[in-house]
Amino acid sequence: MKLDYPVKRRKSRSVKIGDVLIGGGFPIAVQSMTTADTRDAQTAASQINALYESGCDIVRISVLNHDAGDNLKKIRELVDSSRPIVADIHFQYKLALKAIEAGFDKIRINPGNIGAEWKVREVTSAAKDKGVPIRIGVNSGSLPEDILKKYGHNSPEAFAEAAMREIAVLESMNFEDIVISVKSTDTQTAFWAYQMVAERCDYPLHIVITEAGTLETGTIKSSVGIGAILMTGIGDTIRVSLSADPIHEAPVAHKILKSCNLKEDGIEVIACPTCGRCQIDLIPLAESIEKKTAHLKAPLKVAVMGCAVNGPGEAKAADIGIAGGDGMGMLIKKGEVVSRFKEEELEEKLLAEIEAMTGEKIDR
């Protein structure tokens, strides 16, 4: 569907993370982070691979201590080299050096806790030698003390100033392979912090509402916060940060991108919320169709409507859809009824038509 007022994405420079390019107009990348103990290389690598299978483009792992740091090379070897891994570093700059040496594809550091400037410079020098990008990750828990005293915890200005200060250190070493995040758990703080940083530099921005909450609450909060920022044209990578199994994060992120019309591939199922006119068991029907088509790559909007009166009209925005009631069902293309059949055939008729339109197989 061609929009009259499409989102105009902010112009940013491109940064290469392994085989993935972010910024520069490339597709917005989806990220997640493991919860496995990095000291257990096999478990950590298995979770990284599982997150890639769930739809991630980039996966980050935490490096707790030097025992974990000593495992990084083994983890890198256990994961296909085409799958980028990011090392999340706090406090101990030598862990960043270990990650770079182990062949990791990006380093994430926080400006407030990595230590003295000379430590940042040493990490930057090693990253520059190996061609490894650095993400400057600013959040309220890692703001420098002087900035906290100046602005307080939830000030967008504090986040922006901390990011720009760290950028200046890296740029002073002629290092520009930089990604920025200014993430807050407060959606308004994050929104304005990203706007401020976007106005001051052209580095790619990683969009997160951090510590968003449990599966349901975090999904809602992330959708509101990340979606609002994306709709201003800002954002080159995103992560949905959930207090849940991280396997849930990438699917939610893809749905946010799809809802913002920033992702063209894949099936989008739209369904009516049901009302007193609905005479079919619509909710499990819509859930079944969404689950069975989740793997498809072709861009297609699918409508599942429960009212044969308004179904064709409500489905006009979809490529294909169904509506049913009173024992009958209908197949709808672009708002036009193209065939009628028994109600119990609704799902099968729709799935068969989706297969025909996409050329992709659907397991029944």
Image: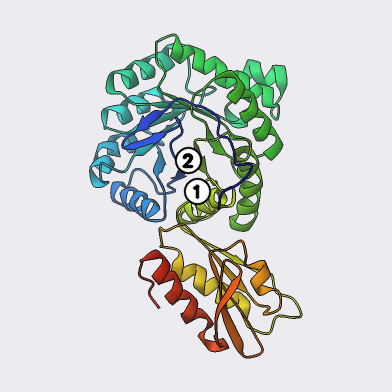
Neighbours of disc 2 within 10 Å: few (<14), some (14-19), many (20+): many
| Residue at x 68%, y 39% (from the top left corner) | 187
Q: Which residue is mark 1?
A: 263
Left or right, 359 with respect to 231, comes to: left
Q: Which residue is mark 2?
A: 28
Left or right, 318 with respect to 56, comes to: right
Of the image marks 2 and 1, the number of the one nearer the N terminus: 2
Check the image and name the residue furthest to the right: 276
Dot 1 lies on which element? loop
| Residue at x 41%, y 62% (from the top left corner) | 296
* Residue 136 in picture, x, y percent from top left: 49, 26
Residue 144 seen in this snapshot = no
| Residue at x 27%, y 40% (from the top left corner) | 76
Residue 153 seen in this snapshot = yes
* Residue 173 in picture, x, y percent from top left: 40, 10
The foreground one among 19 and 186 is 19
Neighbours of disc 1 within 10 Å: few (<14), some (14-19), many (20+): some
CB under 8 Å between callouts 2 and 1? Answer: yes
The foreground one among 1 and 118 is 1
In the figure, 226 relative to 250: above or below? above
* Residue 335 in picture, x, y percent from top left: 61, 68
| Residue at x 32%, y 47% (from the top left corner) | 40
